[in-house]
Structures are given as structure tokens and as C-alpha cells.
Amino acid sequence: MEEFLDFLGDIPWWTWVLIFLALVAVRDIFFQKAHTISHNYPVVGHLRYWLESIGPEMRQYFVANNREELPFNRIERSWIYASAKKENNYEGFGTDRDIYKHQHLFIKNAMIGFQVPEKHPNIEHPYFVPCAKVMGAHNKRRKPYRPASIINVSAMSFGSLSAAAIESLNKGVEKCGAYHNTGEGGLSPYHKQGGDVIFHFGTGYFGVRSRDGGFSMDKLKVLVDENPCVKAIEIKLSQGAKPGKGGVLPGSKITHELAEIRGVEVGKDVISPPTHKAFSTIPELMDFIESIAEETGLPVGIKGAIGKIDQWQELADIMKKTGKGPDFITIDGGEGGTGAAPPSFADHVSLPWTYGFSSVYKIFLDHGLTDRIVFIGSGKLGFPGKAAMAFAMGVDCINVAREAMMSIGCIQAQVCHTNRCPAGVATQNKWRQSGINVPLKSDRLAQYFNTFKKEFLEITHAAGYEHPCQFHMEDIQVNVDDDYLSSDIRRVYKYQKEKVPFTSMQDLYNCEHLGGKKTT
């Protein structure tokens, strides 16, 4: 035996390499049947698959230019990273954008901008920019809610994101006065770290799910009673990445913790249906909204990606007739989506945010209902310039998902659906998420939000206004095409935003329904 071990020890290292490569070649040629390339080109054929696997990273770092990538280009990502880290997020030597390019937008500044007076709330609290409307005020809900921040965390569930990521986001929103939408995975312990919460559920009713997979009002009432952090409830009709399609959570991902939070069985696949069991018509949806609001006392809203508008028209008709309806409406753009979706859905189903929002807003504008609803925009709006356009079109708040993920470390690896997120943000792998320093990442989310609000306020003041709700559609100009050249968005989208009632920031600061913390 010793002689044999000595013989093995005398074999040079390069011989072992050759033996290994020979074994790989034998396996490629005679045993594996799945890959033609590795069969026809044994050993070296594996390089093709390896290079393909790192292709996105190679293009991201070495090939694509600053403005070229999608969904977020390098300039956009760098601005978020620098803002979150409190680093220099300025550009030098002027813009490198083609400012004559189709859809490039311009914000019209005033000759003399708004001057912040002494003792103004923004003197002491430079990041204080709350929503100008109160959720549930018109419908006289028992617990109305004014979001203390115009930028908030969009619906991303525990399960889709890691526990460390969810905890970082929630602690972050507490630090900057924003709210945190739970996503449809239920209310986890990681959502209860001090931040305001909007409880969101979809067709799977996770967290408020009955034994037969339907909706349980009793569970919702207990959830709301036991968790005062929940300030509003959102019913998901559809989402930007895959409207009209339910989700699938593989049984292999369902741990005991996830099963308890979602109200499902351990190790068993959970398939969310494409439509709701609790209602199937618009009148039934209206009754569902009112029953939840009555039982919980909270504002209730709906979220949808926009396609056909006939049912939105029906909703507005019923709201006009009855005086009831959702307290807020979140419009998701077809360009959004942090979850997994088939390319056929992500690429083609539902309208982009600007087209979808303008279509729906016009319906409620024509019915005289816009003052009753808090409109929330969701779809790559986490940049001050885009947010100005959104507010000019009628938005009252914005939700961000991928931008928030990037602020806590997401590198746009685009492997969210594989459970192999290298940054630990969109994975349940304990090792990968152990690299997330929750106190540090929560600070970065808060700093990104604060930087956003600071720069957005500066743009608002440059346009001559005190609050972003005062933007109107003539304030934003967009390049249309070579013939039409450029026009304000009122002419492009063919409506005028309804004026939002606004007195002063001080009145918003003194509002008894204000959420978050007044020190933001």
C-alpha cells in the first residue's frame, strides 16, 4: 500500500491535469447526450457554456456604454449607488445624453424659483416631502393615512427577496419616514422592524389565506389588530412583469418559516391562480374593498398593470354613482418587475407606465374623481427627473422596487429567478445573504431616498413650486419625433392634470394622519 501511495505521490501535477481532462473528454463523448457542442468539441466545448453564463457581467462591465444597458444603464445605477453611499453623484463636463433623442424630457424652470422662507419645515428637515393627499380621507376611513414620503418601497415579498434584504428595507424606511409594501408573500417578522407597512396580497392570499386557498377576513383582522405598523391594505389585480399570470413557488423553496408566514404546506408547490377567488366582477371588487375597509378601518387600494380600460371605466362609473371605492390606486408599468416572468409576458403584456397611467388617470379625471384617490406610480420612476414627469401627470406618490434593491447592493445580475443572486438580495441561500450588513444597508436605502427627495425638491423649487404636487403638464416637455419635434406632455397625452389641493408644507407637517417620523 505504501508503495502504491509513493507511486501516486511521484506523479507530476500536470499528469493529474491531463488525466482529469481525459476523463472529462470520455464523459463528453460517450456518456452525456444533452449537449452537442461538448460532444463534438470535448473539454473545450465547456468554455462556450462558461462564457455564456458570464456574458451579462462581461457586457455590463466591459462592452456596454454608459447609456446603453437595460433595464438600468450604468449612469442610472451609478447615481443610485453613489446616492446610497453618500458619495459624489454629480457629473462633470455637461450631459452625455442626446437631448434631441425621442422621448427625452425637459423640466421647465422658472425665471425666479421658489425661495424657502425662514422657519419653513424644510429648513430643519431638508428631506421632508410627504404626500399631499391623505389615503382614506374622502371615504372617511377610521384610520386615514398620509404617507410621510413621496418615495417608498414597492411590493417585493419575503421569499422573492431574502430575509436580510427585507429587514434592511424596513429598517431603512423607518429612518427616512417612508413606507414598505410587503408584496404578496405575507407579513414576515422582517417587515416589522419599525417602518410603516402597506400590507399587499394577491390571488394566493398569502398571510390571509384560508385552508381552501381562498381569502380569510378573520385572518386579515387579526393581522391588522396585532400589527399597528400596517397603515393600509393593497389588493393586487396584476403586476407589471406578468399581468394576468399567477406565480409558482417551488416546494423546494418553502421552508418552515415561509410556510408559516404564507399559510401553506412545507415542501409542496404553491401555484397562485391568475385571477381572484374573492371576486370576479367590478361590482364584487367594490364590495370586497368596502368590506375590508369596514372590518379593518384602514384605507384600501388596488394595484394593476394597464391593458384594456373598459373595466377601469366601469369602476369609475360605479364610484361616481355610489360615492365609494378604493382610497388609492397603484399603476404599475409593463417595464417593471422584480420577480420571474416569461419573456413573452415581460416584453409584451401590459402598457408601459406613461401610456398606462395616462389612460387610467383620464378616466377618473373625466368622472371628477381624482381628488378622492391617491395615485401611486410604479415603473422605473426612482429618479428625480422621471418623478417630476410623473407628478405632472397626476401621481401623488411613487413606489420603487429595483432602485431600492440596488441601493442595498443589487448589481443587476438578472438572476433573481434562479436563487443564485450574488449580492444576497434576491435569494434564500443563507450563505449569499449573510454578506448583507443590515444596519449598513438600511442606512443606504434611507440615504438614497433622502438624496432623491433633496434633489427632487431642488428641481421643484427651480420650477417655482413648494411641493411636487404643484407640477402641471405644461411644466414638462418631451421630444416626440422628427416632424413634431417637442411638446409639453399635456398636448402629447391630451389631458390636463387636476389641481391638487395644497396650502403649505407646514400644514402637511402638522397633519394628524402623517405617517413615518417628522424628523425626516
Image (cartoon, helix red, strand yellow):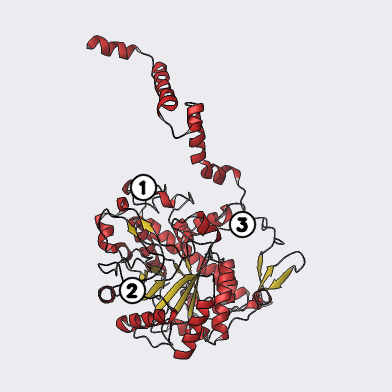
Contact (Cβ within 8 Å) of mark 3 with mark 1: no
Q: Nearer the viewer, mark 3 or mark 1?
A: 1
Contact (Cβ within 8 Å) of mark 2 with mark 3: no
- Element marked by disc 2: strand
| Horizontal side, residue 262 vs residue 340: left or right | left
Amino acid at dot 2: Val
Q: CA distance from mark 2 to mark 3?
A: 40 Å
Q: Position of residue 457 (x, y in %)?
A: 55, 72
Q: Which mark is residue 178?
A: none
Q: CA distance from mark 3 to mark 1?
A: 33 Å
Front-lying residue, 25 or 116: 25
| Horizontal side, residue 242 vs residue 219: left or right | right
Task: List the residue tagged with mark 2.
Answer: 230
> Could you classify mark 3 by the number of other residues whose Cα lies within 10 Å: few (under 14), some (14-19), or many (20 or more)?
few
Task: List the residue tagged with mark 1.
Answer: 432
Front-lying residue, 81 or 245: 245
Task: List the residue tagged with mark 3.
Answer: 91
Who comes first in sequence, dot 2 or dot 3?
3
For the image, the number of numbered tags is: 3
> Could you classify mark 2 by the number of other residues whose Cα lies within 10 Å: few (under 14), some (14-19), or many (20 or more)?
many
Who comes first in sequence, dot 3 or dot 1?
3
Seen at 54% across and 82% down, the residue is 364
